[in-house]
Amino acid sequence: MTSHSQTSHSGHDGHERHYVIIWAQLVVLLLVSVFGPMVATHYGWHWLLLATAFGVAVVKAYMVAKNFMHLDVEKPIIHYIMAIGVALMVLMYGALAADVQKESGQNWKKSAGFHHSFTTSKPAEHGGHAKGAAGTEGTTEHEQH
Amino acid sequence: MSTKTIATQRASMGMPTGRLAVWWLLMSEIVIFGGVLVSYIMHRLAHPEWAEQAAYTNTWLGATNTLVLLTSSLCAVLAHAAAEKGNGPKASRLLWLTILGGLTFLIIKSFEWTHEIQEGFTIQAGGFWSYYYTAAGVHAFHVIAGMCVMVWVAMSAAKNQDLHRVENVGIYWHFVDLVWIFLFPLLYIAK
């Protein structure tokens, strides 16, 4: 069997019981994630909705990774590999979130369909960029001449 | 207990090649699912009105599928424990139960999708539904892929062959479960 197994999986009977206990805890957390948001919606508690829906999901994911995937006893290289994936995910959010989530910015505003129309010139008919979409006031002035 | 050749062990990493490969695979999966989930979150935050569409998803079916996947993960990790003891036939039986869990998940999903499509909520019904079918569809594809590999591993485990693969396929299956743990609140709870 694997070296991982030899170093971290002694006492197999105790482990089986441990896995069942973890599963039971995950089921309880599932119930919390189902009924918690119902209570939160009823009382208008936004923080409780976030905590029970997404906070519990993070806890469940941690429990699965630690206890079922045995990530806690894996070699450090595995942690680094996983961290690269997560870092790329965070980088993607950081790079794109402002463009997707903001309604307007410097010299642009968002129209239907996520097209941007420049505030310094007339928007195009069907959502695309306005004339002179090079984006400078200078371009607009040139067209006026 | 399986006998392994030197070529199956990465001396520099101090771990079996197969398990290292599974973790590399999962890193690429994080990029795939992470891309889908992050773009969904961004658009969902930009479109509060998507909550009205999300209200049509069935929380109880989503929760049932979560329970099914959690239980199948339990079977997979118990199969790993059985393989550790060199009990291939027991590991094989537990892997078949895991496959049954995956099949149950897909059957519930197909009923759910059939109902939603009949109600007019197709993949073209709006931004929310595009993400809903894409994210859940890519996930379901991974469930099917995991089941196919697991059939192969279960058959060899029954003959006490290549028991180290039980752990490898289990790690993959737990990751599929882990992705669903995040999909569930995103698609079914946040309304």
Image (spheres, coloured by chain):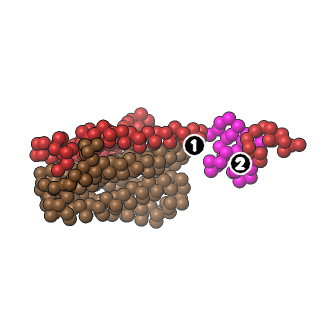
Task: Tell me what residue is drawn at x 37 percent, y 64 percent.
Answer: B111
Image quarter hosting the N terminus of chain B: bottom left
Q: Which residue: 37% across, 42% down? A: A81
User: In x, y percent, where is residue A35?
Assistant: 33, 43
In the rendered image of the structure, the colour used to display chain A is red
Tell me if I can see residue B149 in this picture.
yes
| Mark 2 belongs to chain | A
Q: Are discs 1 and 2 located on one and the same chain?
A: yes
The kind of residue tagged 1 is Val
Q: Which chain does tag 1 point to?
A: A
Q: In the image, is residue B9 part of the stretch drawn in magenta? A: no
Which residue is label 2 attached to?
A129
- What residue type is disc 2 on? His
Residue A10 is left or right of residue A67, and the answer is: left
Q: For numbered disc 1, what is the local secondary structure?
A: helix
Q: Residue at x 26, y 41 (%)?
A: A74
Query: Is B178 in front, or is B68?
Result: B178
Q: Which stretch is magenta? A: A103-130
**Can you say whether B4 is above or below A90 in the image?**
below
Q: Which residue is mark 1?
A: A100
Question: Few, some or many C-alpha atoms within 10 Å of disc 2 (few <14, some 14-19, many ≥20)?
Answer: many
- Marked residue nearer the N-terminal end (1 or 2): 1
The residue at the point 81 percent across, 41 percent down is A140
Report how far apart the C-alphas of labels 1 and 2 lie in the structure: 16 Å
Is A145 positioned to the left or the right of B22 in the image? right
Give the secondary structure at mark 2: loop
Image quadrant where residue B141 sits: bottom left
Q: Nearer the viewer, residue B25 or A56?
A: B25
The prevailing secondary structure element of the residues shown in magenta is loop
Output the letter for the chain in brown: B
